[in-house]
Image: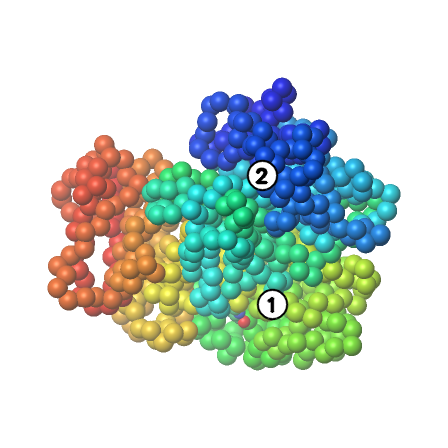
């Protein structure tokens, strides 16, 4: 039984394969307290950990120190305004201007199977895979009810959390903050690991010690962002890939978020995650409810590596829905870095022809095919085919590409509107803007107010009409600016604080419609590279463009940070031309292939113009992709060395679930003199199995490869890569 309620002890015990999570109900006021999250324990009698016999006691025993109690008790979902001065999870504003809430247990329900939330991305699982605990709490004064929701995925060691807020009172209230999860723990000398960056430098990992005060990672850009990521893990000091305790949270959401770790006066740590409260208010009429997005929680007693593999399995099994999720994706060639805006039918067909002869399976036509889009200053919103560029029309081009045996894919940026567009001239009020202010431009474009149903319908129809017009099998859905000037011509003043969240819901609605109407479509999300690489988008698209930086060396760090949480099957990665368009670096074509192999794999270059030697290598890379992709997509990921940490080389591997096969990638970034070879210990193999390394005669026992390792010859030069393929004999 994954969830048990012990009536006498008033205690819930949630068990997965290797973890236990315990919740207790205490005092006459029935506070819902957090007891334990960590390695699995068999005994359910955990209530003694709640410190209710230690001063300052619970209020029924010592009401004179109620504030001290509230300010130190480990709460499951702390409310606001009555004496807990740590970061709260929920606050409201009543018509009378009051902000306080006190949540008491009312009842609970334990059910089997997890149904996704309505209108929001969330995990799913059958009755055998997932049990759900819903604890109903109420604030007696306002009538606000909060349902604490826990999804227990026993086999994959994941607990999901969220809350639903219901206005059970007689008057409307304004929610001013609703986080989705909280973890109150004693500080075990925690460090926070989080992901940061910028455009073309997404998700670089950072580790900082947790000391007194608040450490938060957040976005108020209306999207997850290039800069910060909706993830945080608290790890015990000295945690490595294999050892140490890790408590991780990842948000299934694609808009403003906040994740925070706060160390208090008693060296307790509170970790919270949810929608960012800045510029957020949600009006709840009597009887209405608000569903907060989901948080995925992972506990690992075996270091970061185990955390990573748990997230990968969970997302592959319980979040990504596309029919492509377990399938090899077509190797694509995208014309963005090949041509930018300067292309026509003839050029695209020439690229497709050459690409098809080399084994590439799909042509993707990127930005610039519609309206007067000759550069990135205009025409977003004018989703009609530019027949000066696409002579003969879109269908002709798609048919010609299909005749070459290739699939066809297309780029859209449906959420945007250029001031220089027919759409804007007809509907200037369709842009998100504050009345009386000229909105701020970003890449010379505005964001469409998709919270208005006529705007959403229009934007959706633009995409759908094009997809209905030809055999288009893939869409790259781009989003190239963050939100600002938050205002809608339609929302009333007391609902303007809902705009950020309503916008995200509208994007989800559009993508849901798209998947319903075109169930076989391969959707790749993208946001100026990887600004919306998050679990929310993975619910709609099985792959996301990782970064606009296609340089193999920069990609090592971007892909390391991304793969810390997300499966390789989801990471859009392509081989591009050199000197690289973002950093000007020249790397061997071979290495570019090895690095892109750790993702969905494709090309981002003009195959008719690259050096002949590079072109000749493409069929080998295509064969390499077909040989290894099942393993890369479905295997367990192991990080061996990090270029971000050691500044010289990178090494990671993927091992099949049955441990019969493994592929390790080694990239020497900078060479150094006096090195004969590097000793590398392989990871993830079965110690007792016998293995052969491709290209060698000798047979090794797994234990030897993992404990003693192998000597990887020191290659000549910088940026040199090598694949090490290991199979059981
Ligand atoms: C940003 C994307 O990340 C690029 O790949 C490309 O599609 C451009 N937008 C097009 O404007």
Task: Indicate the secondary structure of the residue bearing disc 1.
Answer: loop
Query: Quick one: label 1, few (<14), some, or many (20+) residues within 10 Å?
Result: many
Q: Is residue 682 above or below residue 619?
A: above
Q: CA distance from mark 2 to mark 1?
A: 37 Å
Q: Report the quarter where the N terminus lies.
A: top right
Look at 76% across and 39% down and name the residue there: 139
State whether residue 171 is above or below residue 488.
above
In this rendering, would 573 be left or right of 178?
Answer: left
Does any atom of ligand 1 lie closer than 8 Å to the CB of label 2?
no
Q: Position of residue 446 (x, y in %)?
A: 66, 72
Q: Quadrant of the C terminus?
A: top left
The residue beneath circle 2 is 74
Q: Residue furthest front?
A: 64
Residue 74: % across, % down: 58, 39
Extreme residue toward the top, this view: 8
Residue 477 to residue 179: above or below: below
Q: Is mark 1 within 8 Å of ligand 1?
A: no
Q: Earlier in the sequence, mark 2 or mark 1?
A: 2
The secondary element bearing badge 2 is classed as: loop
Of 5 and 654, nearer the camera is 5
Q: Nearer the viewer, residue 330 or 218?
A: 218
Q: Position of residue 209 (x, y in %)?
A: 43, 54
- At horizontal 65% and vertical 33% (from top left) the residue drawn is 58
The residue where tag 1 is placed is 482
Front one among 301 and 59: 59
- Proximity of marks 2 and 1: CB atoms separated by less than 8 Å: no
Write down the quadrant of residue 634 in the picture: top left
């Amino acid at each position: 039984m994954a969830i048990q309620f012990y009536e006498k002890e008033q205690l819930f015990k949630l068990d997965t394969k290797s973890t236990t999570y315990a919740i207790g109900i205490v005092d006459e006021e029935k506070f819902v307290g957090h007891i334990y999250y960590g390695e699995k324990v068999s005994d359910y009698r955990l209530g003694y950990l709640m410190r209710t016999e230690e001063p300052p006691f619970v209020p029924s025993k010592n009401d004179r120190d109620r504030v001290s109690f509230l300010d130190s008790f480990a709460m499951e979902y702390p409310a606001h305004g009555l004496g807990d001065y740590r970061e709260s999870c929920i606050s409201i504003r009543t018509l009378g201007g009051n902000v306080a809430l006190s949540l008491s247990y009312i009842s609970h329900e334990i059910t089997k199977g997890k149904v996704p939330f309505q209108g929001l991305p969330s995990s799913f699982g059958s009755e055998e895979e997932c049990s759900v605990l819903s604890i109903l709490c109420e604030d007696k004064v306002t009538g606000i009810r909060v349902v604490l929701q826990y999804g227990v995925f026993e086999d994959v060691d994941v607990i999901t959390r969220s809350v639903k807020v219901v206005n059970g009172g007689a008057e409307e209230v304004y929610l001013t903050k609703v986080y989705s999860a909280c973890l109150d723990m004693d500080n075990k000398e925690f460090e926070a690991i989080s992901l940061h960056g910028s455009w073309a430098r997404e998700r670089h990992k950072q580790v900082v010690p947790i000391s007194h005060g608040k450490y938060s990672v957040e976005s108020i850009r209306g999207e997850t962002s290039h800069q910060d990521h909706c993830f945080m893990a608290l790890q015990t000091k000295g945690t490595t890939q294999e050892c140490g305790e890790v408590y991780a949270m990842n948000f299934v959401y694609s808009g403003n978020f906040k994740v925070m770790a706060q160390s208090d006066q008693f060296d307790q740590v509170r970790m919270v995650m949810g929608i960012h409260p800045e510029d957020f208010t949600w009006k709840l009429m009597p009887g209405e409810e608000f569903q907060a997005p989901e948080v995925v929680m992972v506990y690992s007693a075996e270091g970061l590596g185990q955390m990573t593999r748990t997230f990968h399995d969970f997302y592959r099994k319980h979040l990504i829905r596309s029919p492509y999720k377990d399938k090899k994706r077509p190797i694509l060639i995208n014309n963005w870095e090949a041509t930018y805006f300067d292309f026509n039918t003839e050029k695209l067909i020439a690229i497709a022809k050459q690409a098809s002869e080399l084994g590439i399976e799909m042509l993707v036509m990127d930005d610039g095919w519609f309206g007067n889009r000759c550069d990135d200053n205009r025409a977003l919103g004018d989703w009609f085919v530019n027949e000066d560029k696409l002579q003969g029309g879109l269908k002709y081009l798609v048919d010609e590409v299909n005749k070459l045996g290739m699939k066809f894919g297309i780029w859209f940026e449906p959420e945007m509107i250029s001031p220089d567009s027919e759409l804007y001239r007809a509907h200037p009020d369709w842009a998100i803007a504050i009345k009386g202010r000229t909105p701020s431009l970003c890449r010379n474009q505005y964001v469409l107010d998709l919270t208005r149903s006529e705007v959403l319908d229009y934007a959706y129809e633009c995409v759908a009409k094009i997809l209905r017009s030809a055999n288009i099998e893939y869409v790259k859905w781009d989003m190239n600016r963050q939100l600002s000037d938050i205002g809608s011509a339609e929302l009333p003043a007391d609902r303007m604080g809902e705009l950020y969240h309503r916008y995200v819901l509208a994007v989800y609605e559009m993508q849901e419609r798209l998947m319903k109407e075109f169930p076989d479509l391969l959707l790749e999300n993208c946001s100026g590279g990887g600004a919306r690489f998050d679990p929310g988008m993975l619910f709609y698209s099985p792959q996301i463009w990782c970064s606009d930086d296609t340089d193999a060396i920069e990609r090592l760090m971007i892909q390391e940070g991304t793969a810390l949480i997300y499966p390789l099957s989801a990471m859009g990665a392509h081989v591009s031309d050199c000197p690289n368009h973002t950093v000007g670096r020249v790397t061997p074509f071979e290495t570019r292939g090895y690095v892109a192999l750790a993702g969905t794999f494709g090309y981002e270059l003009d195959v008719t113009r690259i050096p002949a030697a590079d072109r000749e290598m493409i069929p080998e890379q295509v064969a390499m992709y077909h040989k290894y992709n099942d393993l890369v997509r479905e295997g367990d990921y192991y990080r061996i060395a990090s270029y971000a940490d050691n500044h010289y080389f990178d090494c990671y591997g993927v091992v099949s679930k049955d441990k019969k096969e493994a592929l390790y990638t080694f990239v020497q970034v900078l060479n150094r003199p006096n090195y004969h070879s590097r000793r590398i210990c392989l990871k993830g193999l079965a110690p007792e199995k016998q293995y052969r390394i491709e290209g060698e005669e000798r047979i090794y026992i797994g234990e030897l490869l993992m404990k003693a390792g192998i000597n990887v010859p020191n290659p000549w030069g910088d940026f040199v890569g090598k694949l090490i393929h290991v199979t059981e004999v």
